[in-house]
Amino acid sequence: MNKLHVDVAVIGTGTAGLAAYRAARAQGKTAVVIESGPYGTTCARVGCMPSKLLIAASEAAHMLALAPQFGVHPDGVRIDGKAVMARVRSERDRFVGFVLEGVDNIPEQDKLRGHARFTGPQSLQVDQHTSIEASRVVIASGSTPVMLPQLKEVGNRVIVSDAVFDWTDLPESVAVIGTGVIGLELGQALHRLGVRVSVFARGGSVAQLSDPEVLHVAAKALGRELDLRFQQLVVGARQEQDDVVLTTRDAAGAEHTDRFAYVLVAAGRTPNVDRIGIESTGLALDERGIPLFDATTMQCGTSHIFIAGDANNERPVLPEAADHGRIAGDNAGRYPDVRPGLRRTPLTVAFTEPQIATLGESYRQLCAEGKPKFAVGKVSFENQGRSRVMLQNHGMLRVYGEYGTGRFLGAEMIGPRAENLGHLLAWACQARMTVAQMLDMPFYHPVIEEGVRTALRDLAAELEKGAPKSSSAPDTTPGV
């Protein structure tokens, strides 16, 4: 068996792992990356990029369907499923190729292929061929899509989201299990491309939303187009030739049976920390088996081990994985001189139509026990000028502010071009701007951003009233 001694060992070559490796090497340390699967990040292979390619095709189809409302009547519209999926796979492979170029630039002696397991706090074994003594370790082992236990042994027509991007044609029908970001994005895209889609949710959640008013508007807006079925428990399924017979139970206890070509399980992802010998590290773990860590340093306890990206399940999106990896790699390189790294204002976007965005502190976080009261402002996009011009006048934005200081705290929204509004507001949040300062910024006409101004004006008026004194508990009444 080969034996290596390195300063830093990185488990995983996804976004976080590659960032950690580069940061450790920038500190002048010796480092290796260990990968058991294919090179190429989750985002490039099966995540953000291929899903956006499918969404882009669906948007083209949707605009043709919407055109008659503008007085434009396209003729002979035909969706070629094979061509759609061929472009998705081809462009996906290009994006993966860019990642592989970065991996190719890593010296061969710094790359190890195989499954890594801890055999002690500072020792790893890679398959049966290499043992590593590492002064520091970065866990960047990524995550795996969840498969519901009751659907595990049904057959090859029950899939997770990763499998969608290897389709060579669009199926006739799909049941989507889950109303998170992945389920909604893929479900709506497939529906707009002519696939019969039903989306099932165990509860009433929509993407990452926690604000009850925005959640209600989101369910209504998306439900106009999609067959959304909330409060549905998946009882089981059986595969009959090329179909899956799916049985669900509603909140009243009634069971329903439907037949689909595929059942797509989009019920979240699980951090890959269960098969890396984490028990040999001596680290304290949470109830999910994830090491306890400092979110500003990525350090596990006071140890020489750091955890980054989807493996720590803190904010499982690509920009955060890149930041995690850089912070973890920096600190692994300079250990024991561990320093807090830059953590940016949280920002998450779902590329549905309308788009969904959350940023800063969420409504749920602001309502947590012990939190001070906060003010809320809002705007509906139903009568917002530019939104109506584009026939995209659906949704709501709710913005939150701090009594006393007037500081902008965060927002939740569903609406047109929320990806752009989300960035604008996230920058203001990270700059710790007050609502008054934000209202001093320029707003053109006619633009969707005028809706932001309306919501901020509403918030400023609520802040001017001052915090209610009737109760010491956080007041979460909308508009207070």
Image (cartoon, grey):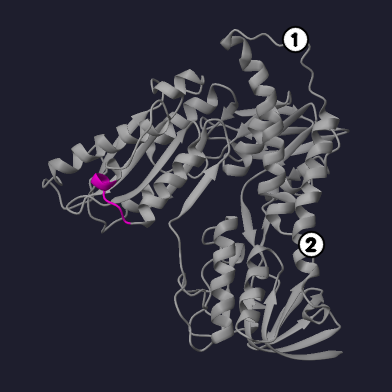
Q: Is residue 266 left or right of residue 407?
A: right
- Label 1 crowd (10 A; few <14 / some 14-19 / many >=20): few
Give the mark, 2 or 1, whose residue is nearer the N terminus: 1
Residue 399: image x %, image y %? 33, 41
Q: Is residue 211 above or below residue 287?
A: above
Q: Is residue 85 above or below residue 294?
A: above
Amino acid at the residue labelled 2: Leu
Secondary structure at numbered mark 1? loop
Q: Is residue 67 left or right of residue 359?
A: right
Amino acid at the residue labelled 1: Asp
Secondary structure at numbered mark 2? helix
Residue drawn at 55 percent across, 41 percent down:
350
Q: Is residue 122 above or below residue 203?
A: below
Disc marking residue 103: none
Residue drawn at 84 percent across, 33 percent down:
169
Image quarter (top left, top right, bottom left or bottom right) of the N terminus: bottom right
Classify residue 351 by image quadrant: top right
Q: Which residue is mark 1?
A: 75
- Label 2 crowd (10 A; few <14 / some 14-19 / many >=20): some
Q: Is residue 464 left or right of residue 275?
A: left
For residue 287: magenta? no
Q: Which residue is mark 2?
A: 100
Magenta range:
432-437
**Residue 13 makes an appearance in the image:** yes
Q: CA distance from mark 2 to mark 1?
A: 42 Å
For residue 435: magenta? yes
Residue drawn at 13 percent across, 41 percent down:
465
